[in-house]
Amino acid sequence: MASMLNPYISFRDNAREALEFYAGVFGGEPSIMTFGDSGFSADAGGDPSDAAKVMHGYLGTPAGFNLMVADTPGSVEHSPGGNISVSLSGDDEAELTGYWEKLAEGATIVEPLTQAPWGDHFGMLTDRFGVGWMVNISAPAA
């Protein structure tokens, strides 16, 4: 297997909802393991309310994207987003515009998807889960 680099996004109690939303954006079928599925035990000092939370969620898409998510247990500090954004880029204008439109539902648009000074179409948003996204659609070759 070749090495891969995948975004792994932490949430506070809504990883399942986020992963299902991203499956609606990009396609694919989410795979979810909860803390309870992994053998989590309140007897071992864990918070019983964490058992149903997502310990590991994965989405592989028809386009070859891989996205992983998890809920942060209640006993751990959660710091959403940080200084990281997920970047989508390519030259398929219809596909990338479609992703943008779906991600934009309930999002805060930071930079509208418009023609950029370098000739591509570019936009930035923060989705309804607080995750930053950048979309760059390459300009047609001259």
Image (spheres, grey):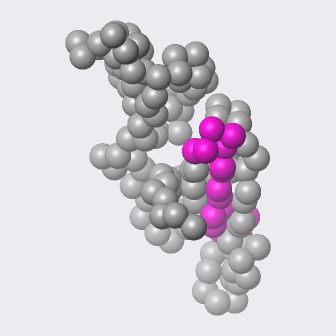
In the picture, the quarter occupied by the C terminus is: top left
**To which quarter of the image does residue 52 belong?**
bottom right
Residue 20: x %, y % from top left: 70, 42
Residue found 53% across the figure and 21% down from its top: 92
Is residue 136 visible in the rendered structure shown here? yes
Magenta-drawn segment = 50-65
Q: Is residue 101 something that shows in the picture? A: no
Residue 77, position as x, y percentages in the image: 42, 64
Estimate the x, y position of residue 21 in percent, counting from the top left.
66, 37
Q: Is residue 111 magenta?
A: no
In the image, is 22 to the left or to the right of 129?
Answer: right
Q: Is residue 103 above or below residue 16?
A: above
Is 128 on the left or on the right of 21, as rendered? Answer: left
Q: Nearer the viewer, residue 55 or 4?
A: 4
Number of marks in picture: 0
Q: Residue at x 50, y 32 (%)?
A: 127
Most extreme residue toward the front is 142
Judge whether 132 appears above or below 142 on screen: below
Q: Indicate the quadrant containing the N terminus: top left, top right, bottom left or bottom right.
A: bottom right
Front residue of this view, candidates 101 and 138: 138
Determine whether, in the image, residue 33 is placed left or right of residue 22. Answer: right
Q: Position of residue 53 (x, y in %)?
A: 67, 62
In front of the other: 122 or 21: 122
Above or below for 24 versus 20 = above
Residue sitting at x 41%, y 37%: 87
Residue at x 58%, y 16% (from the top left corner): 94
Instruction: Using the rendered view, name the quadrant where residue 117 is placed.
Output: top left
- Residue farthest to the left, as pictured: 117
